[in-house]
Image: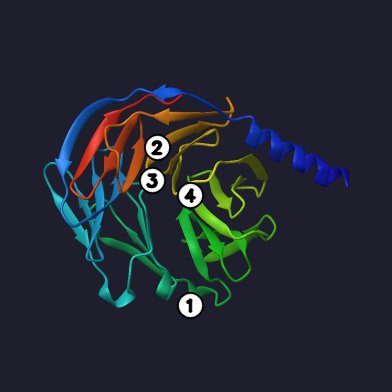
Amino acid sequence: MRKYLFLWLILCFSTVGFSQNPKLKTTALTAAAIEDKTYIGFDGLNNHYYIKNNIFIKQNDNQQWEYKNVALGKISMVDFINPLKIVVFYEDFNTVILLDNQLNEIQRLNIFDIDSTIFVSKIGMASQNQFWVYNALTQQIMLFDYLKNTAKNIGNPIQENIKYTQSDFNYFYWIDEINNWYAIDLFGKVTLLANIPPFEKMQIVDNERILFVKDNTLYCLNNKLKTVFEIEIVEKSFRNFYYKDQILAIFTNQQIKNYKIKLP
């Protein structure tokens, strides 16, 4: 009984403690036209990533590279946190492709061929030659070693349905259907970070901050400060956004506009 009371108090504090603060100022930088492409994001080397007609595209000011694999169906997810080893996931065929920085195929993994009990629905690059994997069959997070073709469960099965996931080299994050935000580390330690406001789109910056969209307004939630900030941008309607290294990209149907912003 005490355990459930303690959890309830944590959730109440996480939710009620957030307050609405003045807007965060941004500085407009550049704008570029975008035609008939889904913008995914950019890396620290000034490369931009897109999907067009199920073709994965990497582009900078000087070059463009493409990766296409019709046989595997629709691209479900791309992870480029390591620009030298990019992950492309095809959920329909339970297959992961590793690409180099010129989008040449390095490795192809059909997870069913390795372990028929692993049904991947979420994946991301982890450290030490591993993937984060969410196994939809067991509702469990796994670490998959793509050099040894071995997998291990970490943590207990997740009880609630998952709405959103994101990962970096050291953590796998998820938000469940009741908006609880969790993190699990490489050793299987699970941390409840917060109960967050309703959202339509989301990006986790780190284990203290998230960016989210609600009713065409972009917000920054700082979990340490227990504060929600509204981010000031010109666009009143936009398709999505991407943030990295104090650069915020807002993309509409016609263009990508970059802003400089310092998050609290």
Does 108 sit left or right of 131 as displayed?
left
Asked if the residue at tag 4 contacts the one at tag 1, i.e. Cβ–Cβ closer than 8 Å, the answer is no
Q: Which residue is mark 3?
A: 81
Report how far apart the C-alphas of labels 1 and 3 lie in the structure: 26 Å
User: Residue beneath label 4, please?
Assistant: 166
Which element is circle 3 on?
Answer: loop
Disc 3 residue type (three-letter): Ile
Helix or strand or loop: what does disc 1 sit on?
Answer: helix
Q: For label 2, count other residues whose C-alpha is less than 10 Å away and answer few (under 14), some (14-19) or many (20+).
A: many
Q: Which is more foreground, mark 4 or mark 3?
A: 4
Q: Residues within 10 Å of mark 4 (few under 14, many from 20)?
A: many
Q: Which mark is residue 247?
A: none
Q: Earlier in the sequence, mark 4 or mark 3?
A: 3
**Front position in the image: 81 or 219:** 219
Residue 150: give x, y in percent of width and height: 55, 65
Residue 218 image label: 2
Q: Which residue is mark 1?
A: 113
From the viewer's perspective, is 221 left or right of 191?
left
Mark nearer the viewer, 2 or 3? 2
Q: Is residue 158 above or below residue 62?
A: below
Cα–Cα span, label 1 and label 4: 26 Å
- Hey, what amino acid is under mark 1? Asp
